[in-house]
Image: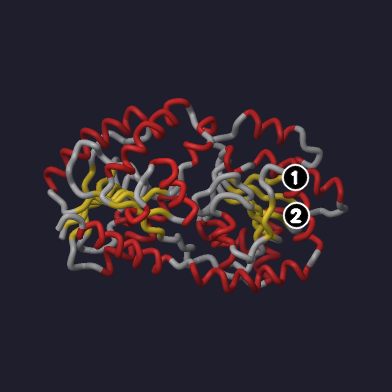
Amino acid sequence: MKIAVNTRLLIKNKLEGIGWVAYETLKRITRQHKEHDFYFIFDRKYDNEFIFSGNVHPVVAYPQARHPFLYYIWFEHTIPRVLKKINPDLFLSPDAYLSLSTDIKSLAIFHDLNFEHYPEDLPYLERKYYRYYFPRYARKASRIVTVSEFSKQDIIDQYDIPEDKIDVVYNGANENFKPIPEEKKEQTRKKYTLGHQYFVFVGALHPRKNIARLFKAFDHFRKSKESQIKLLVVGNKKWWTRDIRYAYEQMQFRDDVIFSGRLSTEELQQIVGSALALTYTSYFEGFGIPIVEAFYCDTPVITSNVTSMPEVAGDAALLADPFSVKSIAEALSKIAFDEEIRSDLIEKGRIRRELFKWQHTAENLWKSIEKTLEVNQ
């Protein structure tokens, strides 16, 4: 069997959410199903790190698809030509982009439909592309995988897709995320926060990550409680908007917000594992991998009570209203000053994290691949 895969997000040292999902699942699937051939389609020069085994055949197809006009060229012109040459049994797309110009069976992984709910968070051309093409991708797909029951229901509601066409496959967490010894925690705190305890946020500084309200909530927390606790923000400022900048500049305690930028997986594991708590109060998520990564580090979690986050967190996190600065600030205060709450969340996180393993993800994705290949056979 030949499976063609859209691997344009496998970029060395630049893996983000969807890229990590592709990396972790494809690494396992290709190695565990060596009887099949996988054709990885890149839109730039690839790194051999992503050629996971001898049954992976890399294909480079230009142009680099990083703009709506280029998305169209790549998926509607380049991909059909490549697929015609390969003649695969299936086209797998980990980022849900498909080609409407080919009849090859397709399996699309939809992570969320945030652009349908908050289109204003995206640049004009991006949101126009997403809102035009993704309903068509959903109908075009032979089968759909998504990452939470919330996202499954959202796809059904938004695009009128039959329930039995969609499989829920939960994400996992990088196996490097694990508890670290107290001595290492102290070293990490000295390196990043001058030895002080800190809350950590992990992710792109995108509007839907709710950074502006987190800044306001942290400021409110620091004004109401005497402490030297810091806020460590991990991620790049690609989406640093006027509202985020204004919220930051208005902070009384903005000097206690530390920006680390993008970090290696090893550095990220040390930072999350040494934090007082993860603060992940987005107002929209299809899953929320940092929540699970924190569970694996024995780090308490504060997350939102909306979209997929309660589903992922279960009873192992403090849930806050992401639209209420007061609610987020109260959660920060509970975590900071109640050791019993922290200990309880850590214990519950140890139980909860067993649901989320990349091996489970790979196995369930493979089941969906098999279901897709059964269609009309």
Q: How far across and down, in percent of the image, does residue 63 sit?
A: 27, 34
Residue 15 is at least partly visible in this image: no
According to the picture, the residue beneath numbered tag 1 turns out to be 217
Tell me, yes or no, whether the two marked residues, 2 and 1, touch with CB atoms within 8 Å.
yes
Q: Please give left or right for residue 330 compared with residue 241 in the image.
A: right
Q: Taking 216 as reference, is 2 above or below it?
A: below
Residue positioned 56% across, 39% down in the render: 206
User: How many C-alpha atoms fall within 10 Å of the one at disc 1: few (<14), some, or many (≥20)?
Assistant: many
User: How many C-alpha atoms fall within 10 Å of the one at disc 2: few (<14), some, or many (≥20)?
Assistant: many
According to the picture, the residue beneath numbered tag 2 turns out to be 332
Residue positioned 81% across, 62% down in the render: 337
Which quadrant, please, contains the N terminus?
Answer: bottom left
Q: Quadrant of residue 298?
A: bottom right
Which circle's residue, 2 or 1, is located before the other in the chain? 1
Specify the amino acid type for callout 1: Ala
Q: Please give left or right for residue 216 compared with residue 364 in the image.
A: right
Q: Taking 369 as reference, is 85 above or below it?
A: above
Q: SS for tag 2? A: helix
